[in-house]
Image: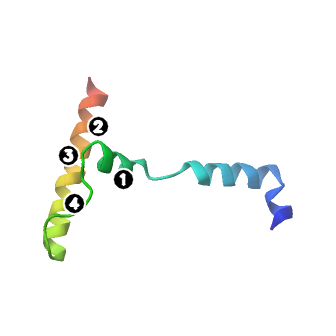
């Protein structure tokens, strides 16, 4: 594995893997202040997550069109 990681191709892949973190979850937690679900049950949680995702996408869309 050490030898494989020394090649330029492997370094580029590994570097890309390190930076491809889901920033959406961090934004939702820090900017929108959503740290936990407030409802119980799978259907309620799905609906709550849909609303959070909608809020995030609306916020993003408004910044992109501004």
Badge 4: residue crowd in 10 Å (few <14, some 14–19, many ≥20): some
Say which element carries label 3.
helix
Say which element carries label 2.
helix
Q: Disc 2 designates what residue?
A: 60
The numbered mark, 4 or 3, whose residue comes first in the sequence reads 4
Q: Residue 10: x and y, percent?
A: 75, 55
Say which element carries label 4.
helix
Q: Look at discs 1 and 3 and give the one toward the viewer.
A: 1
Q: In this view, which residue lies farthest toward the right?
A: 3
Measured in 3D between alpha carbons, the distance from the residue under mark 4 to the one under mark 3, in whole angstroms, is: 10 Å
27 shown above or below 10: above
Q: Disc 1 designates what residue?
A: 25
User: Mark 2 and mark 4 in contact (Cβ < 8 Å)?
Assistant: no
Measured in 3D between alpha carbons, the distance from the residue under mark 2 to the one under mark 1, in whole angstroms, is: 13 Å
Q: Is residue 6 left or right of residue 25?
A: right
Say which element carries label 1.
helix
Residue 49's label in the rendered image is 4
Q: Is residue 17 left or right of residue 11?
A: left
The numbered mark, 1 or 3, whose residue comes first in the sequence reads 1
Q: Look at discs 2 and 1 and give the one toward the viewer.
A: 1
Measured in 3D between alpha carbons, the distance from the residue under mark 1 to the one under mark 4, in whole angstroms, is: 11 Å
The residue sitting at 20% across, 46% down in the picture is 55
The residue sitting at 15% across, 64% down in the picture is 38
Badge 1: residue crowd in 10 Å (few <14, some 14–19, many ≥20): some
User: Mark 1 and mark 2 in contact (Cβ < 8 Å)?
Assistant: no
Number of disc labels: 4
């Amino acid at each position: 594995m050490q030898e494989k990681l020394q090649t330029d191709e492997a370094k580029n892949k590994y570097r890309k893997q390190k930076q491809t973190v889901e920033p959406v979850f961090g934004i939702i937690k820090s900017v929108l202040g959503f740290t936990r679900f407030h409802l119980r049950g799978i259907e309620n949680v799905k609906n709550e997550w849909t609303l959070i995702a909608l809020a995030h996408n609306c916020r993003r869309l408004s910044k992109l069109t501004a």
